[in-house]
Image: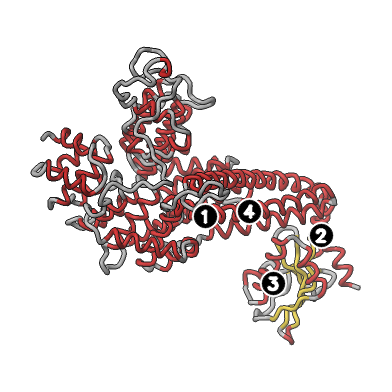
Amino acid sequence: MEPHALVAAARRVPRHQLAVRAFIEETRGEDYLFAVEAAIETADERATTVLAVAAAATGNVPDAALLRRVLPLAEHIAVAIALVKACPDDPLPMLIDLAASEALSHERESAVLWAAVRRLEGRPAPRDLVARLRLHARRGLGPEAAAVLVLAARAVGDPDLLSIAEPWIEATAGPLIEEADDNVETMWEKTPLEALDETQPFVGAASTIRREVPKIGRNDPCFCGSGRKFKKCCEGKKVASPPPPDSSLMHARLPDGEFRRLRPAVLAQIPLDSLPTRRVIDAFRTFVRYRRWSDAERALGILDRRTDLPEQSTSDGYRIDLIREAITAGVREVVRRELARVSDRSMLTPSLELDVALLENPSAALPRIEAQAERGLRGEDEDLIELAYSLLQHSPALGILVARGVVTPQRGLDSTMLVETVEEARDRLGLPPGDDAGEILDLMEGRLLDDQVAASNRTNDAKLKEEAEDLREKTLRASERIAALEAELWSKSVELERARKSRVAPAAPGHATPAPGSGEEVSRLRAKVEELKGLIRDGNETRSELRRQVASLGERLSAADRESVGEETREDHEGDDLERDAPPMRLRVLVPEFDRDARHALQTVPAAVAAKALDVVSALAGADASAWHGVKALEAVPNVRSARVGIHYRILFEVKSDERELRVLDIVPRGGLATAIKRWRR
């Protein structure tokens, strides 16, 4: 039998053991592996699954190279796991590469990584596998995917991996993790044929029965081709069943959410030319997300010919999205091909050109890196953010260092996302989680809010003070609300997964509450999950807007602060002659003591100033020569010394050598130094 004829026959086989056994009996002696190749070429999930199972059942298990192409198409995760176990050669490098391809759903990637860990058979996990597990643990996983990931993480036992997976470990504790463990271990013990259901899966009363062919509406055109409506033509007549309609018509009628959830292999079978433009765009995005390059380019070619693209969208805009994803995946051929097709060359931004240069010839990219860094330093903050992203992708260690200098609360959302990418880069490098970039951003954001409240106090502007306090509270409340919504989303997602699996019949008539597992309950939970996702999106947008307002307020406070301290600044220069170089003294460790004025100052100055002041006192008391280098003595009160805290503040202190004590007297603005000297002279 010709391979394509065998594929066509396999496509018609129901997905259960009895049917596949019958198929094997009818086609015994055929080259199933050769036919698997043909099925993969057409992205046919059913035929690929049936033929791969048939090959394994007849002693020809696909090797790792072929399995790499089968696993994304296998209809059952259980079959995928069984094929991995049966693989005749070492599948570990292939499984790691497949997980890194980003071509799998979260559930399937968890299963592939778990199977890779299971195939270790006591060997230590290689660094690449641990890195993939760490990266996967950072994603927004569903309950089943999270539980299987936790099982893999525990089996590997890497402390850094367990630290990153800790939220999932806590979330899946109890029945969820126990059920997942039973499921995957049961799958592992089966052959690929046994992994299929024994017979046609039972369809309970609560299950949703999906039609292979959509029902014809009474007002739809009649299937016989008469041109009349169905109700006025063949409805009620004893005629042959209508032929299956064009799959594009069937899928065009799906609700938006259902169409976007179609698997890429299903989308690849649809004639996209006959779909409306918005559906082609949805299909294109799915192909890009799963890195199905030829399908994405096919969809893009259709968009090139469409004239009804969404407002402010162009096919070149979608092409740039494809190019960026191909750069991330390192697929040079796609990048080169699509770059040549960009008609609007103004869309080739410097950051994109840098990404291409780093992909094609990293050693020659230094001038572009320097040019982009200079643009960023001259005021184009976005160039610095993009530079950090480019380097994190191509040179992660260097990218981490650049990112630490780029994060800023003035671009809170950009910086938060950048910190997440930094953590992923640390995963790829095998470094412990928790980069300084995150701590830097947290400190900067906290101090920014505190400093803005303090600055509003200095301006004596009641309105600005109230606005600063209000923004601080709103930002904190927004973060707390998002965290609560995410916790509720997880809980409802777990309920939805359980309801989908349940076969409990629906509630009896007259009962208001739907029974667990009923179609009504599944629909209710699905609607709740979508509602929570929408609320989280809205919450993130609100938090981003609050961060923009914080940045704007900071600019206004800086201007007001400059005006209010103008007189004080003039006093700064007038006070330059109030200090002189302090005479040298023998350095030794001193015990710091804070006078009442110093303690009061620490509680009233901006938080950033207080923190810096304590750092300076610590360095002075610890006999740090560099800290003592800038110490001055007051002209009018020689026993009192001063040390700088930033530009605008001074610490006043004295040293009691006999008691080995450093007595901190006060922390004052530099412009208030003369007033402080008068007080100490008295």
Residue 457 in the figure: left or right of residue 553? right
Observer-side mark, 3 or 2, equals: 3
* Position of residue 671 in the picture relative to residue 279 (left or right): right
> Mark number for residue 479?
4
Labels 4 and 1 touching (C-beta < 8 A): no
* Residue 260 visible at all: yes
Q: Crowding near pointer 1: few (<14 within 10 Å), some, many (20+)?
A: some
Vertical placement of residue 357 versus 516, above or below: above
Taking the spot 47% from the left edge, 65% from the top edge, the residue there is 173
What is the C-alpha distance between the residues marked 4 and 2? 45 Å
**Location of mark 1 (residue):** 490
Quarter holding the C terminus?
Answer: bottom right
* Disc on the earlier residue, 4 or 2: 4
Helix, strand or loop at mark 4: helix
Q: Taking 306 as reference, is 88 left or right? A: left
Query: How far is disc 4 from disc 1 in space, using C-alphas?
Result: 17 Å
Q: Choose the circle earlier in sequence order: 4 or 1.
A: 4
Dividing the picture into quarters, in which one does residue 247 lie? top left
Q: Residue 140: where, in percent of width, then height?
A: 47, 52
Q: Which amino acid type corresponds to the residue marked 3 in the rendered image?
A: Val
Single out the mark in the foreground, 4 or 1.
1
Q: Amino acid at mark 4?
A: Ser
Which kind of residue does numbered mark 1 sit on? Trp
**572 vs 543: above or below:** below
The picture quadrant where one finds residue 226 is top left
Q: Which label is found at residue 575?
A: 2
Instruction: Name the mark on residue 617.
Output: 3
Residue placed furthest toward the bottom: 658
Percent x, y of residue 115:
30, 58
